[in-house]
Amino acid sequence: MMEEWRLPGYDEQLEKLEIKLLLEAVYLEYGYDFRQYAYPSLRRRIRRRALLEKQEDISSLQGRVLHDRDAFERLLSDLVIPVTELFRNPATFRWLRERLTDGLRDVSFLRVWHAGCATGEEAYSSAIWLEEEGMLGQARIYATDISRAALNRAREGQLPKDRFPLYDSNYREAGGQSELSRHCEEEEGFFTFKASLKERIVFAEHNLATDRSFNEFHLIFCRNVMIYFDPSLRERVHRLFYESLAPGGILVLGGKESLAFTSHADHYETLSEEHRVYRKIE
């Protein structure tokens, strides 16, 4: 499909330069830093956006996104495609519930960070887990993402009815103690999470590529976000998480991610290699 978009005389090196300039312009104008994201994935998504915007080349796309905020938001949505669901990878949530609950219960005010939260399903999963364990009232969940559109959806806290059977199955596999429907209110076409969950979650913009730590946390989730980063950006983000964790704090990564080959590997003990759960030890 994208081959048809190429102009006569297409120059791969010139296109690479155009992409570099586009990413630099996006960073300078909007503050979103994709300059260290994995190039093949960026190239594919940027070229697709140029086609959809009916731009003849990436330089033309750059001009459009700099002068049209809506065009920029569409590009942003392409670059940070959210892949999430309620209690995604339920075996991991079951492990966390069974192995970590008692230790976290001893924390007087529990702070949890979901970094790269997308549309918020994972943050609501944690809220449900903590509420069922009687811990939500003494906890604050911070859910951050680079995408305003995703955060706006997350704040709404709505589940499409056609997704509910999958989410209910995940909830049960994750060790849910009652019925998922108990945590929601049914409305026409969707379910909405109850206010008791929403009020314990703070949704906010945060860019892992450029922003600093903003609190000390006892539990950090960042699952399947860094797979899109190049090694230097992954190293930066691991440093950010290390600095953000309280002594003995827990880091949960995605199934394709690891602390191995990072400069912080020796500062954690592995609690579960299968579920990518690590405890800060120094």
Image (cartoon, grey):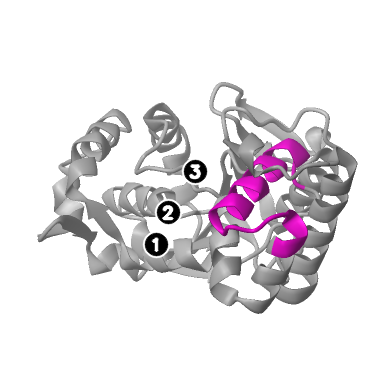
* Nearer the observer, 256 or 9: 9
Could you say where residue 265 lies in the image, as x and y percent from the top left? 79, 34
**Image-quadrant location for residue 263:** top right
Task: Give the residues in magenta.
Answer: 37-60
Name the N-terminal-most of marks 1 and 2. Answer: 2
**Image-quadrant location for residue 42:** top right
Separation of residues labelled 3 and 1 (CA atoms): 28 Å
Assess whether mark 2 and mark 1 are in contact (beta carbons under 8 angstroms): yes
Q: Magenta region, mostly helix, strand or loop?
A: helix
Q: Is residue 139 visible?
A: yes
Badge number at residue 123: 2
Q: Residue at x 42, y 31 (%)?
A: 89
The amino acid beneath tag 1 is Ala
Could you say where residue 276 lies in the image, as x and y percent from the top left? 59, 30
The amino acid beneath tag 3 is Gly
* Nearer the observer, 245 or 78: 78
